[in-house]
Image (cartoon, rainbow, N blue to C red):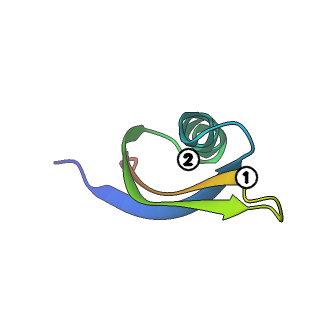
Amino acid sequence: MSIAKVTEIKVSSTESFDDAIRTGITRANKTLKNVKSAWVKDLEVSVDENGNVSEYKVLLKLTFILEEL
């Protein structure tokens, strides 16, 4: 029987939502083992003084399988 755990991370990128998602998953895989899925829970942007998007932010829920003892 496998047991999974879900954790949330918030990631930002100055390029795009897609880049933020990829960056978050890549970074999570450096710390967590057996990452199996990611769900985008929330999207957000920061806007600069000129009204342009300056940062793309995503809140990811990552599911990973716990190792057997």
Q: Secondary structure at mark 2?
A: loop
Could you tell me which secondary element the residue under label 1 belongs to?
loop
Q: Quadrant of residue 47?
A: bottom right
Q: Nearer the viewer, residue 25 or 51?
A: 51
Left or right side of 68 for 57: right
Vertical comparison of 39 with 10: above or below = above
Q: Nearer the viewer, residue 47 or 7?
A: 47
In percent of width and height, residue 69 lies at 40, 52
Q: Distance of mark 2 from mark 1, alpha carbons?
A: 35 Å
Q: Amino acid at mark 1?
A: Asn
> What numbered label is drawn on residue 44?
none
Foreground pick, 62 / 65 = 62
Label 1 crowding class (10 Å Cα cut-off): few <14, some 14-19, many 20+? few
Q: Is residue 69 visible?
A: no
Q: Quadrant of residue 28?
A: top right
Q: Position of residue 45 (x, y in %)?
A: 61, 59
| Residue at image point 64% right, 47% down | 31
Quick check: 46 left or right of 65? right
Judged left or right of residue 42, residue 65 is left
Residue 1: x and y in percent read 16, 48
- Do labels 2 and 1 touch, CB within 8 Å? no
Instruction: Give the residue at x 73% y 59%.
Output: 51
Say which amino acid is labelled 2. Leu
Q: Which mark is residue 32?
A: 2
- In this view, 27 is above or below 56: above
Q: Which mark is residue 52?
A: 1
